[in-house]
Image (spheres, coloured by chain):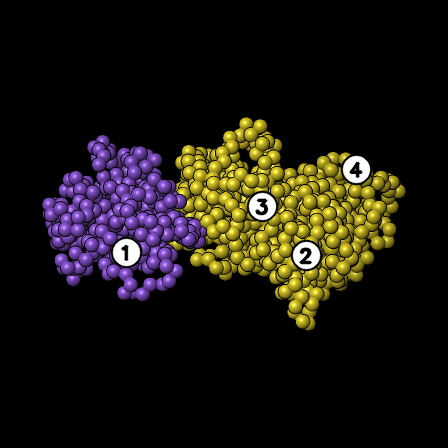
Amino acid sequence: MRTGVIGLILPPTFSFLEMMWRICPALAVGCTVVALVPPASPTPLLLAQLSGELGPFPGILNVISGSASLVPVLASQPGIQKVAFCGALEEGRALRRSLAGECAELGLALGTESLLLLTDTADIDSAVEGVVDAAWSDRGPGGLRLLIQESVWDEAMRRLQERMGRLRSGRGLDGAVDMGARGAAACDLVQRFVREAQSQGAQVLQAGDVPSERPFYPPTLVSNLPPASPCAQVEVPWPVVVASPFRTAKEALLVANGTPRGGSASVWSERLGQALELGYGLQVGTVWINAHGLRDPSVPTGGCKESGCSWHGGPDGLYEYLRPSGTPARLSCLSKNLNYDTFGLAVPSTLPAGPEIGPSPAPPYGLFIGGRFQAPGARSSKPIRDSSGNLHGYVAEGGAKDIRGAVEAAHQAFPGWAGQSPGARAALLWALAAALERRKSTLASRLERQGVELKAAEAEVELSARRLRAWGARVQAQGHTLQVAGLRGPVLRLREPLGVLAVVCPDEWPLLAFVSLLAPALAYGNTVVTVPSAACPLLALEVCQDMATLFPAGLANVVTGDRDHLTRCLALHQDVQAMWYFGSAQGSQFVEWASAGNLKPVWASRGCPRAWDQEAEGAGPELGLRAARTKALWLPMGD
Amino acid sequence: MFAFANLCMYFRGTYSVWISKIQVNHPAVLRRAEQIQARRTVKKEWQAAWLLKAVTFIDLTTLSGDDTSSNIQRLCYKAKYPIREDLLKALNMHDKGITTAAVCVYPARVCDAVKALKAAGCNIPVASVATGFPAGQTHLKTRLEEIRLAVEDGATEIDVVINRSLVLTGQWEALYDEIRQFRKACGEAHLKTILATGELGSLTNVYKASMIAMMAGSDFIKTSTGKETVNATFPVAIVMLRAIRDFFWKTGNKIGFKPAGGIRSAKDSLAWLSLVKEELGDEWLKPELFRIGASTLLSDIERQIYHHVTGRYAAYHDLPMS
């Protein structure tokens, strides 16, 4: 069902098409839109006037022309259910921090830079045309990072310089120009970038027939920029192309993925196998093979990493404006006096348990990291009590060092796991389901001690096993869907794993929720670091004993301890790719605030309980959508 | 003419370095072709100037089975006076010697063409097609003999057709040798090599054939005979122009380009001029390096100029037949 009122914020230089691609899907699913546009553009106002003429529904599109200072005002209006922000990185970060805990969801589409990978088996002249499309025209949104294979460096540079010399810049209405101007602010930005690049030793080449007045800037080619220089870390502004060499395809992938931005990229190679390998390996939202800048409203366009994770176009674009039916609207959990600096910083100390009565419980569980149980860094454990107050067992107190170790182990296991075929992953999940069923009596008795009735406990265990099998089957059945676009050739919508997923399980349903969150994450190829239910982590640790024998090391890691402290460590970790938090409202707010660090996608429950035993909430399509990210792979055909 | 003796001997080495690794991506070239047509438009008096320049590039052609001396004579006169005198006077261009670049006919009609041009007092060259035009599927001996006879009759430019079967079977060295023989048979005459790109199969083959034709000594490379199903299109032209530019970078020699077939409207001709200007630059916009093979194009250009001068659209009978 639809989300509600959308607040849309557009950057100072946006194209009409981009604006339509964000407004139309929102209106089509039934949301209404309030758009904040920079004061210099009259087009959205004209659009709003047209929409106002629709008799029965005058208010579906509203446009406010205002400066960037109105952004936080719009975002924190009480009636807005979702804010879609499109613009620069730092503003997106600031908005994420300020909207933590508010009832509005946030979708970010940041950054304008793209990447072009030129191998030695490419048609170099056509790739140069791709560079022109990407950076030296009005079609591309921003600058370009150009990676050229060393063996064709000289040829490519020569052709680039020749082509640059033929570009013409001028006012848009003159019928024979290639590129126009983007305003004084953009001009200043690029001048600063080029000056810094020169001072750091890069070679800068500018050419083309460009008027010398202010807002016009000539096409620029920067080479020999040392990768460690500060200029190379920043996003490349329009109309600059920064060229760097690489030796082999593997090195190209490392260099290309070695930046926090993950918007769009193109691969130029006439060898199909090499082109597909590079296309699959790039961590971006859109990959074009032997083309650049193709867009279509039926193909999802978005990014990953610091390019934000909101999508427009295709089914993912529609999902942005929908939420699962039957779930209540999000409530604001804002608490104004949450101190982000001290939340979860110190672990509250627990008094040692009193003298033990009755048969002594098993030795304390360690942390399950890297496929085996290890002692925690802090070398302390805390007692877990059952429903009648008796001692149920001891679990380890994990800390920041343990989280760091767990995330490292998960990263080590990730390439192997993501490379497995869906069938292999399904087989492992089914094996775990079988192991759960073999352990039914132990698990049921532990649940009974926590106050669950025997019948219900057994049903919970059975349901957990069923869920594991169901997710395994779901991933088996999923193929790469073909998107229809106005292109001769296929466009694939790939679903790729996110990376390392951090999951903080809810207190209730200690076994079922743990399994319901673990199964989709693993099924889609992610590796997981989990903080199990604080009330009774023992059930999760029982499952770990099976995972120790069945799963590859590091695939699923379980860290017990103080939930707020561990949440803090995970949320602030820059190398965790996504986070699911089902704890308190304050924790949810902190997690949303902290995700601004590396802009990881966050799913927080905000303190609302969730009916894990219901199909819709415990095993619905929402979990599948959130456990993977989309990539659009364009394959123009023809010879 | 330039000496390529050392290239003869080192064909294999040059081939592997210059040609064998070439890749051309068809969809990308198609995209570039669409862009060029949309992005460089010329209007008003500049358009009239470009059209007059386009006239000086035309090789006025008649290649039909029913050519006789009467229509050849008419053609030659049209070549001398391509645009009506009063229109040129209105543009103040009547004394600039605007004629077409050449007249192109079948080998049997070369004598008639030379006679007609001499009678008109005009020294524009007569180009003859040769080597089994248009299909090229005759014995090498007769093909070479055709060239020699045409040169004897007075043709100063020869348009030869390459042997497409050599391209399609990958016999590049044999193709190179054949074109060198054509070159020798031409002697002092200007050699234009028609690649018949509509029958070469892929853009990569077009590039390779262009390179080999240039290496073997052609003065011009030409897209097509005008008799294929697909003649001169922008994607093919882009590939050939890139080959010309690469050859210039490697050897310093400028080879000319001629699209032929399918160029009928004045707007098309302007698009072709901007294509050459974009890809190769202003130095190639001279009759020595650029020709357009066309027959009905001239009347459309004349009608556009009539419209520019008078503001009215001409009827068919207002302008002299060619």
- SS of the residue at dot 2? strand
Q: Residues within 10 Å of mark 4 (few under 14, many from 20)?
A: some
Chain A display color: yellow
In contact (CB < 8 Å): disc 1 and disc 4: no
- Identify the element where label 3 is drawn: loop
> Judging from the image, what secondary structure is the residue with disc 1 in?
loop
Question: Are the residues under marks 2 and 3 on the same chain?
Answer: yes
Q: Chain of mark 3?
A: A
Residue under circle 3?
A: A182
Q: Chain of mark 1?
A: B
In this image, A279 relative to B93: left or right? right
| Residue A633 at x, y percent in the picture | 51, 52
Q: Amino acid at mark 1?
A: Arg
Same subunit: marks 4 and 3: yes
Q: Within 10 angstroms of label 1, few (less than 14), some, or many (20 or more) residues?
A: some
- Foreground of the two, B197 or A426: B197
Left or right: residue A62 versus residue A182 is right
Q: Which residue is mark 4?
A: A380
Looking at marks 4 and 3 on the same chain, the residue that comes earlier in the sequence is marked by 3
User: Circle 2 is placed at which residue position?
Assistant: A35
Q: Earlier in the sequence, mark 4 or mark 2?
A: 2
First in residue order: circle 2 vs circle 3: 2
Chain rendered purple: B
Q: Is residue A369 visible?
A: no
Q: Label 1 vs label 4: CA separation?
A: 103 Å
Query: Image point 50% across, 44% down: which residue?
Result: A169
SS at badge 4: loop
